[in-house]
Amino acid sequence: LTLKCLAQCRRVEAIEVDPRMAAEVKKRVVENGRTNLNVIIGDALRTNFPVFDVCVANLPYQISSPFVFKLLAHRPWFRAAVIMFQQEFAERLVAEVNTDKYGRLAVNCQLFAKITRD
């Protein structure tokens, strides 16, 4: 995913909690002749986000909700986010009023962002 983003973006800021995974990504990036990656090693929930225009993420289920709320609070505003969630979480995110899955998550996210599911 990171390599695909690097080919399309002027600069990619990545946050990775696992130093070994960060080292592997950096190695692959160098092998592919790319220089537009900066890896921040740390917990995405505890790390200050850099300024960005687009967020692309593939998240573990256990941090999905806190990540989304942190993302919605991020300033300056960003243009778009493409985030891969587990199906159950995605269903709660796009839930409509008067459905079983509609709750705090859907209310807050739909208030601040246009949410779609593909």
Image (spheres, rainbow, N blue to C red):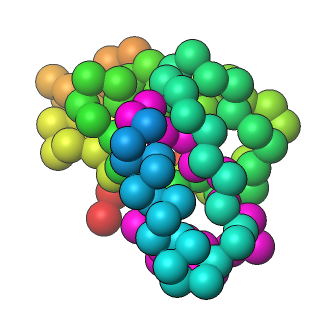
Question: In the rendered view, would you say 55 is above or below 35?
Answer: above
Question: In the rendered view, would you say 66 is above or below 11?
Answer: above
Residue plotted at (49% across, 24% down): 43
Q: In the shown orientation, is residue 41 left or right of residue 116?
A: right
Q: In the shown orientation, is residue 48 left or right of residue 69?
A: right
Residue plotted at (68% across, 53% down): 38
Q: Nearer the viewer, residue 29 or 90?
A: 29
Q: Nearer the viewer, residue 40 or 11?
A: 40
Instruction: Estimate the x, y position of residue 63 in percent, counting from the top left.
Output: 35, 24
Which quarter of the rendering shows the N terminus? bottom left
Q: Which residues are magenta?
A: 1-18
Q: Is residue 108 visible?
A: no
Residue plotted at (39% across, 35% down): 18
Q: In the shown orientation, is residue 87 left or right of residue 37?
A: left
Q: Magenta stretch containing residue 9, yes or no?
A: yes
Which quarter of the rendering shows the C terminus? bottom left
Residue plotted at (75% across, 50% down): 52
Q: Is residue 32 visible?
A: yes
Specify the quadrant of the image occupied by residue 72: top right
Q: Magenta stretch containing residue 89, yes or no?
A: no
Instruction: Estimate the x, y position of residue 75 in percent, counting from the top left.
Output: 80, 31
Q: Nearer the viewer, residue 11 or 96?
A: 11
Q: In the shown orientation, is residue 92 left or right of residue 5?
A: left
